[in-house]
Amino acid sequence: MAEPPDRRHPIVLTYTLHALDVMERRGIRLEWVERVVAAPEHRTRDPYDGAVERFFARVPEHGGRVLRVAVNTESDLWRVVTAFFDRSMGGGL
């Protein structure tokens, strides 16, 4: 897995148009996405795309639901591909 950016520097994320669209439709805030990527409770490689990693963490402001953020970590700037509340991970963290 790619290492996270140097902790002395903030993580700079870019977003696909798809990610921005679904985040708006699903009521997912940018700060939640950034927090999940910066401090995930769970992190795994996407089984369908080796360049993408999945970051998971609970969002207290949204009833403690688990937010999954898919990020292309192989690009120079990490690129958020999509984000959604993952019902299958609810009790799994």
Image (tube, grey):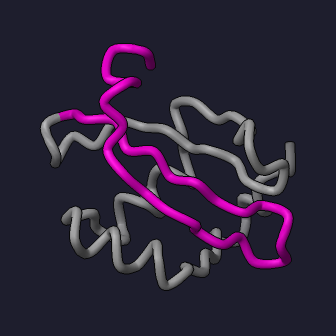
* Residue ID at (57%, 30%): 42
Q: Is residue 34 left or right of residue 29?
A: right
| Above or below: residue 55 compared with residue 7 | above
Q: Is residue 20 left or right of residue 73?
A: left
Q: Is residue 75 left or right of residue 60?
A: right
- Quarter of the image for residue 66 reads top left
Q: Nearer the viewer, residue 61 or 52?
A: 52
Q: In the orientation shown, which residue stands out farthest toward the top?
A: 91
Question: Quick check: is 63 in the magenta stretch?
Answer: no
Q: Nearer the viewer, residue 28 or 37?
A: 28
Q: Position of residue 67 (x, y in %)?
A: 37, 44
Task: Tally the marks.
Answer: 0
* Residue ID at (44%, 19%): 93
Question: Quick check: is 86 in the magenta stretch?
Answer: yes
| Above or below: residue 76 compared with residue 42 | below
Q: Which residues are magenta?
A: 64-93
Q: Position of residue 57 (x, y in %)?
A: 43, 37
* Residue ID at (70%, 41%): 46
Q: Is residue 76 left or right of residue 24?
A: right
